[in-house]
Image: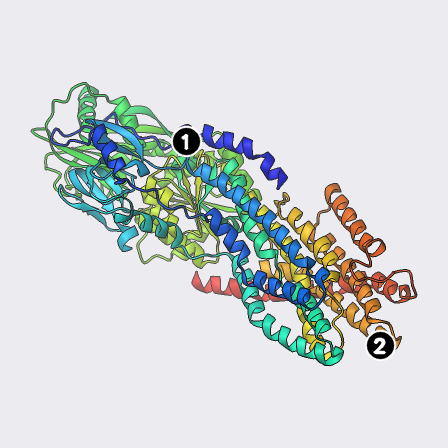
Amino acid sequence: MKKLFRKKREIDKVVFSSSEENAPKIDNSDIRIPADIKGLSNQEVQQLYTEGKTNKEVEDLSRTTKQIILDNSLTLFNFINLFLAVAVFAVGYPKNALFFWIIIINTAIGVIQEIHAKKTIDKLSIVNKTEVMALRENKLVKIFQDEIVLGDVLVLTLGNQVPSDGIVLHANGMEVDESLLTGESDKITKQNGDKIMSGSFITSGLGFVKINAVGEDNFVSKLSKEAKTEKRSTSELMNSLNLLIKGLTFAIIPIGLLLFWSQYQSTQSFPKSVLGVSGALISMIPEGLMLLTSVAFAVGAANLARKQTLIQRLSCIETLARVDTICLDKTGTITDGTLTFKELIPQAGFPASEIERAMSEMMAGLSDQNATAKVLRTRFPLEKSVWNVKEVIPFSSDRKWSGVTFEEKGSFVMGAPEFIYSDVPEALREKLAPYNGQGDRVLILVHFSEELTSPTLPEEKETVAIFIIADTIRENAVDTFSYFVKQDVTLKVISGDNPVTVSQIAKQAGITGAEKFVDMSTIPDSANFNELVENTTVFGRVTPYQKRELIQALKQNGHTTCMTGDGVNDILSLREADVSVAMASGSDAARAVSDVVLLNSDFSSMIQVLNEGRRVINNIERVASMYMVKTIYSAILAVTFIFLFLPYPFAPLQLTPINTLTVGIPSFILALEPNYQRIKGHFLTNILRISVPGALTVVFNILVLQLAGMWFNLSHQDVSTMCVLLTGCIGFQVLLRAARPLDLKKQIMIGLLLVAFLACFLFFGDFFMLTSLFTRNVLFYLPLILGSRSIFNYISLFMTRAIYEVEKRKENRRIKKKKRVI
């Protein structure tokens, strides 16, 4: 905890200094304001603020401070512990209620850590706040979504998510995807006067929208939550822990009642029966495990926050650690998103000057705000428009082209050759091949006399020019992708660009198998995507629907998938993937549906994300295996002593040294340790591999000591003392196994804990209800201590072999199923 607090200033500095740098950039220099549209005045805005007619910020999905305290305090197990503490206090054993104070202290420490982690994440969330363009005082200004007031006029462009319900005042080729509302991804064209709903996003064009609902009066809060939480959790860890909690919930009360009856029959003492039952049930409850799990996730998210990565769904940290296939979008991931105009190649005898004039007028008439449009506007500027625009069809991810019809000039369409021509002419294909082969982005400009009345282009059209545009590969791309290859993570590139071009860029970035590419525009809907995704690395000319189907096919083949993207064409696949990652520089909608947002828009940050996920899962596995030891042996002993009619060997106070020194303290330390090993096996089998041998060894030793007590007439207190000693020694064996690899710090920690454990016998024996170790009892416990290691190792070997056989059979069934699917 102190280590986390020491980082606070550094984290705060990073978070706030990066706010301006990483906020979404909105370019309003090319947006023309219609003369008949007037925005609010500053005075009107101030009045509406005073009246409370503002767009309240969407509620954060992270728990509030109050929720963290209540969720970690008011639990069923804590109530059971409280009941047991009151019971042992009431029957005259107040010292035995000490365990409850330790639980309170541990809970307080965990809650403080989680609250601090939450504050760090909340500060970083400020960086990810979405900006919108509003028309105020007849000027376009950038404001945050929660600063919108009723009656504001917003300008929404490609990639923007609609923040509040409104009415379209002026639409310029605006198309909207309302899939977050209806579940259908059909593009809807908006005309002047149409309603537009919050949660939908702009897929093409531009529009001026007047807001007619804010705050709780519109759907934005509900829809934004659903967009982030509708994804079904794939957390193996949480599913396993929930299964454990359900099992204990149903078992602990009947076991406790039966054990109380058995203890009362054997001791004929109500106080001693209460003491015995309390000792059994206290160890059955993994009181710190769920707390440490939530703390580990929260601290993991805080650590990523310091590295400019915002986690929007905590459970995705585990999924990230288990990802074996990452699907990349070329733009913004392999490349840095910046484009360079390289060359204009006139065609069909058209003079370059006329082409430049046509492009200047065309870019002035279009409202497109994507990277390609911006680089073309820079290359083909226009001081004053002369040509009159009749029709405009802006760019969309489905069409892959945009076009303008001018009066007396005909129509010009610019975009991807494969989408402008149903069958690219052979002569043109040959001209484009060398540029595609070297990884350049190739666009063509065509001309025809018909008007653009629909997205369907006429058959007769003439190629006017070829534009060569270069992408810039990220400097750290090669190192980043090679790292993932070494970690056995498969990379797939899914892009809407030409597959040859994407393949070449992927090769330059060092992606293994980049030469295996396919043009998805040639793949029929009936094709077997399950086989295709296994044998192909680069997918070009992919539609948004095909992206989703490719992700579905990977999941059906048994892969844990991660999708990265930044555009509206990535929305469907981002929602489908097991975990989704968006760039902060991308569209509002992409960020809204993603589990993780890279605020520096740098894919190399994924290395840190993967490592942090592994650290969290590996450490929770360590901690869980330690808690499960005492849960398993306590459950077995509780059921066993129901039928033995012997006094239960532990009192609550005697368990304090075991639970605190072999589980409690080391678990808090190990839960936050750096541990970036690959995730292997399943969570439940991994913890059982350590905990079951430890628990069975404890049960064996205690039963042997019970028999020795009966045969040699040992007192109950002597037997209890030896049980505590043996159980603690086995707990340290489990700790040594769980803490691997053992560095110097861990060795010192375990050494100090062992000294403290022995001190409980040597100096505080009376307090903990323990007798002296230096009696004839040494003849009983010393052989068991020496033999426990062998027993533990033997059972561990048996468990490992058994688990291996089970997992081998499961893997064989998975492979057979995968072959049937393919």
Disc 1 is placed on an element classified as: helix
Disc 2 is placed on an element classified as: helix
Where residue 708 sits, quadrant-wise, is bottom right
User: In front: mark 2 or mark 1?
Assistant: 2
Q: Residues within 10 Å of mark 1 (few under 14, many from 20)?
A: some
> Decide: marks 2, 1 in contact (CB < 8 A)?
no
| Residue at figure coordinates x 59%, y 37% from the top left | 5
Quarter of the image containing the C terminus? bottom left
Query: Is 156 situated above or below 322?
Result: above
Question: 283 or 521: nearer the eye?
Answer: 283
Scheme by which the image is coloured: rainbow
Query: Dot 1 corresponds to which residue?
Result: 22
Question: 703 or 791: nearer the eye?
Answer: 703
Query: Is 254 situated above or below 450?
Result: below
Question: 714 or 579: nearer the eye?
Answer: 714
Residue 393 at x, y percent in the picture = 18, 38
Q: Which mark sits nearer the N-terminus, 2 or 1?
A: 1
**In whole angstroms, how far apart are the C-alphas of marks 2 and 1?**
73 Å
| Residue at figure coordinates x 29%, y 45% from the top left | 215
Q: Residues within 10 Å of mark 2 (few under 14, many from 20)?
A: few
**In the displayed image of the protein, which residue is found farthest to the right?**
776
Residue kind at label 2, given as amino acid type: Met
Query: Dot 2 corresponds to which residue?
Result: 710
Residue kind at label 1, given as amino acid type: Asn
Where residue 527 sits, quadrant-wise, is bottom left
Q: Decide if residue 175 is in sight here.
A: yes
Residue 265 at x, y percent in the picture = 72, 81
Question: 810 or 175: nearer the eye?
Answer: 175
